Image: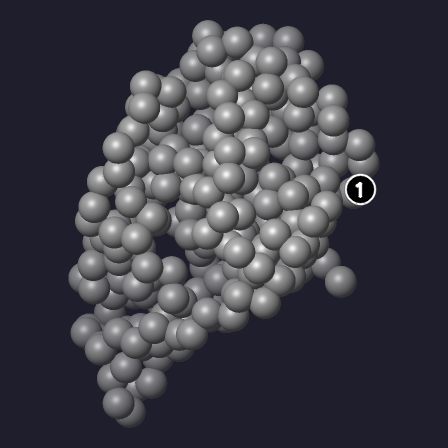
Amino acid sequence: MNADTDPLTLAADLLRAVRYGELTRHYERTLRDLSPATLQDALATDDRRLAFWLNIYNAHVQLLLDAAPEQYQDRRRFFGAKVVAVADHDLSLDDIEHGFLRRSQHSLGLGYLPRRADAFERVHRLDNRDPRIHFALNCGAESCPPILAYDHETIDDQLDTATAGFLDTEATYDSDHDVARVPRHMLWYHGDFGGRRGIRSLLREHEVIPNDATPAIRYRSYDWSLALGRFGSREADGSDTPRE
């Protein structure tokens, strides 16, 4: 596939152009003009779909809010507006997050309520939900994780690194009271994480809680303050250090 029209390359290049303040019109136009067949061939696996849709989402949040930050005052309208063009389809940020990345889950269903999907969404959504996306998506808020450029060949390691970094700063364990405090995402997308059992398993995996602990789960408050430009300092290796 020609690199100039490879969807995965275009999505990563768009995100890098956004990061460094370069012109993005070429990438946006080429993504819009992709043929459905080209997109389907490129997004043949979940690793490819993850890398593509994460980069597309994060790039467009930054683009749109940098151009008109006042949109963030009405977040429901902002995330629901059909402003992202891919393969001649107009998509919203909600479509990308809840349709493609969360495999057609209702935005307010806590991960237990499916949403109606059109044919385009059914073709290009993930086969299996991956809760680690919630440590990779940046919606423009202060409480969001740093932005990385995801690569389908290394995305499993990148998502592990992003998850570990976010939990290291945002999840705590009070052994005296046997209480774990976790990011708000884990409440909003409870079913994505497999409920409390899945949350505890993830906390054990990342050594937030001891292997023999079954703590009560409490959810941290979420800071919706607008915070643009929070890119990881070393995209290739998944560093989660924001730039200044």
Mark yes or no: residue 161 visible: no
Residue density around tag 1, few if under 14, some if 14–19, many if 20 or more, within 10 Å: few
Q: Residue at x 65, y 56 (%)?
A: 70
In the image, 36: left or right of 117? right
Residue 120, above or below 228: above
The residue located at (28%, 42%) in the rendering is 105
Image quarter (top left, top right, bottom left or bottom right) of the C terminus? bottom right
Q: Nearer the viewer, residue 83 or 168?
A: 83
**Residue type, mark 1 in image:** Gly
Q: Is residue 242 above or below residue 50?
A: below
Up the image or down, 110 lies above or below 148; here it is below
Q: Quadrant of residue 49?
A: top left
Judging depth in this view, the residue of 178 and 80 nearest the camera is 80
Residue 166 relative to residue 109: left or right: right
Image quarter of residue 183: bottom left
Q: Position of residue 121 (x, y in %)?
A: 36, 25
Q: Residue at x 33, y 85 (%)?
A: 174
Q: Position of residue 230 (x, y in %)?
A: 66, 56
Q: Residue at x 18, y 62 (%)?
A: 197
Relative to 215, say whether 150 is above or below.
above
- Mark yes or no: residue 84 visible: yes
**Coordinates of residue 216 in the picture (x, y in percent):** 22, 78
Quadrant, the N terminus: top right
Quadrant of the rendered image containing residue 27? top right
Residue for badge 1: 21
Q: Position of residue 64 (x, y in %)?
A: 65, 43
User: Circle 1 — which element?
Assistant: loop
Nearer the observer, 87 or 37 = 87
In this picture, residue 167 sits left or right of residue 244: left
